[in-house]
């Protein structure tokens, strides 16, 4: 696949999915057919599959395999893509014909799957967020740095690949809003839950709850975690700490990314939070988090020649 086609790959990706030309062009042997495996066949991964199916003729892609541990979704994924079905993602990763994996599983799986995919030499597109804890994201980042000359990787924050995203950066840095003193990102989804759900019988026979839990601590099955409906189920599980990071990791991955991208801030080393009292089971509904800057951003004025501000 030539580089022009790769750019078209991005343009064609539409609302659900956007791979950057940068990540895609790093793929070795990219003049040949790119062979993809999709892990997870829920709402978001299905949106990716539809996009890939639309692109496959023009962009010389093949969806070789799909994986899910819920049989109805796996069946549907096979129907959409024609890919070989897998229930266990490690078996899919063992398939040496696959160059690239798209991961759309719940968030407690992201770090483990990304590390395993890199270990088998696959290029990776993994849905946001990068991991489910700060420690996990550090391990994934360290592994990315080790592999970055060999593997093309991308976090699934599709907005980041839209032109408008970098336009915001350009405008801020050109001074369109004057001195930048503070950046705020908001979220308005309120998904309050009291705590982990009580046991509610046995999981459906065609669903592997133990595999779904994977690296998370054990929890009894309750269908409110996972209904398997045809839409996105992330709003059923991502407010439980063992499976997600609430709205900070969900919409925050998009909205804070826009701010971070514009100001070139380094990684925060401290954070202050206020809002709902900490609940060890579930993420807060009311939360304000502040990443304090040592030097007011005003001093840096976000001009490219100034090495923007540090955070402590
Ligand atoms: N970029 C976006 O705009 C956007 C939008 C929605 C969701 N997402 C992200 O996409 C991801 C998935 O969200 P969703 O709403 O599709 O969730 P979902 O629950 O609908 O789908 C996840 C699927 O992964 C499967 N799965 C779980 N563990 C697995 C394993 N070990 N092996 C194989 N399959 C496994 C589940 O059975 C399920 O079908 C989340 O990380 C979410 O944050 C991103």
Image: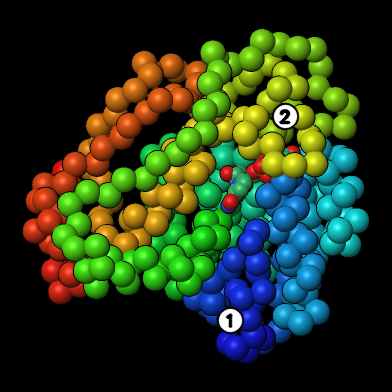
Give the residue drawn at x 53%, y 49%. 128
Image region (quadrant) for ligand 1: top right
Q: Is residue 269 left or right of residue 9?
A: left
Residue receiving disc 2: 226
Which is nearer the N-term, disc 1 or disc 2? 1
Determine whether, in the image, residue 50 is placed left or right of residue 243: right
Asked where in the image residue 201 lies, by quadrant, the reply is top right
Q: Residue furthest front?
A: 177
- Visual colour scheme: rainbow
Q: Residues within 10 Å of mark 2 (few under 14, many from 20)?
A: some
Q: Residue at x 76, y 82 (%)?
A: 58
- Residue drawn at (65%, 67%) of the image: 14
* SS at mark 1 in the image: helix
The answer to whether residue 245 is above or below residue 308 is: above
- The disc label shown at residue 7, or none: 1
Examine the rendering and report whether any part of residue 285 can be seen. Answer: yes
Q: Residue at x 45, y 39 (%)?
A: 187
Q: CA distance from mark 1 to mark 2?
A: 36 Å
Q: Quadrant of the C terminus?
A: top left
Q: Quadrant of residue 223?
A: top right
Q: Nearer the viewer, residue 186 or 249?
A: 186
**Where residue 238 sits: x, y (%)?**
57, 32
Pick whichever, 36 or 96, lies toward us: 36
Query: Which image quarter holds the N terminus?
Result: bottom right
* Image position, residue 278 (x, y; %): 38, 18
Q: Is mark 2 within 8 Å of ligand 1?
A: yes
For this view, does 32 lie left or right of residue 289? Answer: right
């Amino acid at each position: 696949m030539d580089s022009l086609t790769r750019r078209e790959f991005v343009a064609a990706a539409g609302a659900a999915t956007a791979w950057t030309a940068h990540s895609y062009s790093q793929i070795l042997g990219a003049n040949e057919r790119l062979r993809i495996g999709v892990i997870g066949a829920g709402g978001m991964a299905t949106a990716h599959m539809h996009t890939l199916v639309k692109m496959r003729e023009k962009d010389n892609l093949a969806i070789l395999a799909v994986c899910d541990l819920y049989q109805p979704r796996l069946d549907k994924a096979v129907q959409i893509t024609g890919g070989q079905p897998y229930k266990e993602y490690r078996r899919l990763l063992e398939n040496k014909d696959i160059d690239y994996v798209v991961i759309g599983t719940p968030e407690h799986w992201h770090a483990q799957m990304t590390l395993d995919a890199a270990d088998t030499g696959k290029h990776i597109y993994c849905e946001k967020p990068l991991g489910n804890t700060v420690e996990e994201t550090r391990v994934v980042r360290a592994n990315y740095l080790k592999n970055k000359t060999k593997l093309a990787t991308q976090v699934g924050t599709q907005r980041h690949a839209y032109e408008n995203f970098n336009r915001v950066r350009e405008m801020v840095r050109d001074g369109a809003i004057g001195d930048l003193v503070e950046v705020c990102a908001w979220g308005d989804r309120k998904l309050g839950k009291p705590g982990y759900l009580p046991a509610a019988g046995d999981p459906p026979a065609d669903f592997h709850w133990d595999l779904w839990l994977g690296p998370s601590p054990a929890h009894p099955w309750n269908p409110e975690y996972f209904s398997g409906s045809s839409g996105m189920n992330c709003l059923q599980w991502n407010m439980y700490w063992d499976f997600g990071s609430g709205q900070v990791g969900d919409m925050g991955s998009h909205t804070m990314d826009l701010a971070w991208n514009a100001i070139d801030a380094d990684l925060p080393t401290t954070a202050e939070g206020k809002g709902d009292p900490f609940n060890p089971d579930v993420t807060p509904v009311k939360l304000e988090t502040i990443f304090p800057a040592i030097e007011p951003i005003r001093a840096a004025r976000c001009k490219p020649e100034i090495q923007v501000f540090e955070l402590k």
